[in-house]
Amino acid sequence: MPRRGSISQAMARRCRSTCPRSIPRRTSATTMKIWRSLARAAATSGTAGCAAALFAAACASIAAAPGEPVADGLAGTGLVDVQRLTPGIDLDIRYAGSNNFVGAPVDGYEAPRCYLLVEAARALAAVEADLRTHHMRLRVFDCYRPVRAVQHFMAWAHDLDDQRSKPRYYPNVDKSALVPDYIADRSGHSRGATVDLTLMQCDMQGRTCVPVDMGTEFDFFDERAHTDAPGTDDRQRANRGALRDAMERHGFRNYPLEWWHYTFQMEPAPETAFDVPVK
Ligand SMILES: [Zn+2]
């Protein structure tokens, strides 16, 4: 299960800020190289002063203004619609449709929307703002996940006769072994501070963005999906590192068995697992 931890009060305050400063965090040499090269390209093409903003904190208009109330998107939960804080964020909410390992819409997903607790939503907005200065964006696969959806996953995992998605999602793992490493009876997603996502590379105008090569697709249940899996090539490793660096700078922590899974490290950590449908 995803690790849990804490960050300092100062960092938590920064993560909650709507105009976050850069938090000194480890940045891999490869990521530095990629972003430097992107900045050089931006400077050469004369686009929007992106080079000058390299590694500076992004104070983007996509984040809420300080003190701005954010409406509770799912009554009584405190979960907010991420698109309200980050208009234009790319959502590919797999469990709201059939393009997932279950092969059908998952219980509790009535719409392809992304809800998170406001602190996590603001931090995600800051990640997206940072990335946009480097001609990159996020693509989000899942956010808050109702408890009933987790129960749907468990029922699917225990139905060993249903092997339809094995070739695509778990070709090298016996379905009976998916629990608990890949599918568990509880998920941090239900507490509203966890998100599954990938990176997209955009053109200089930001009109066209395509997902980068991460080595496996989302929800690929295999050792190759481990964030530091040895079988990935240099480019895939660099892309995973770029996502991790971008997320860690704003208080998210990766689950090492899944390159796409990040939890916002809040103080105090949320304890409530919600079961309100996504709609
Ligand atoms: Zn996840």
Image (cartoon, helix red, strand yellow):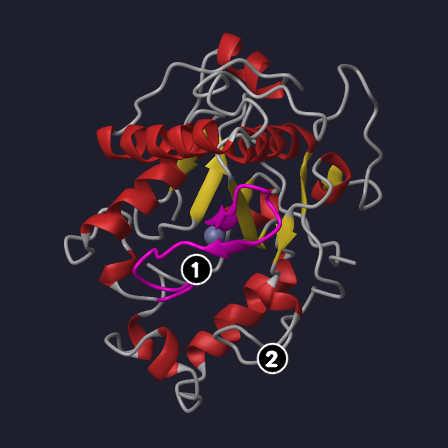
Residue situated furthest top in the rendering: 10
* SS under mark 2: loop
CB under 8 Å between discs 1 and 2: no
Q: Position of residue 228 (x, y in %)?
A: 22, 47
Q: Residues within 10 Å of mark 2 (few under 14, many from 20)?
A: few
* 182 horizontally vs 171: left or right: right
Q: Which residues are magenta?
A: 195-220
Which residue corresponds to the image point at 44% horizontal and 21% vertical from the top-left? 54
Q: Looking at the image, which is closer to me, 211 or 103?
A: 211
Does 20 sit above or below residue 171? above
- The first of marks 1 and 2 along the sequence is 2
Tell me the residue that label 1 is attached to: 184
Q: Looking at the image, which is closer to me, 173 or 167?
A: 167
Q: Position of residue 108 (x, y in %)?
A: 70, 64
Name the kind of residue labelled 2 in the image.
Answer: Ala
Tell me the residue that label 2 is attached to: 104
Q: Looking at the image, which is closer to me, 248 or 88?
A: 88
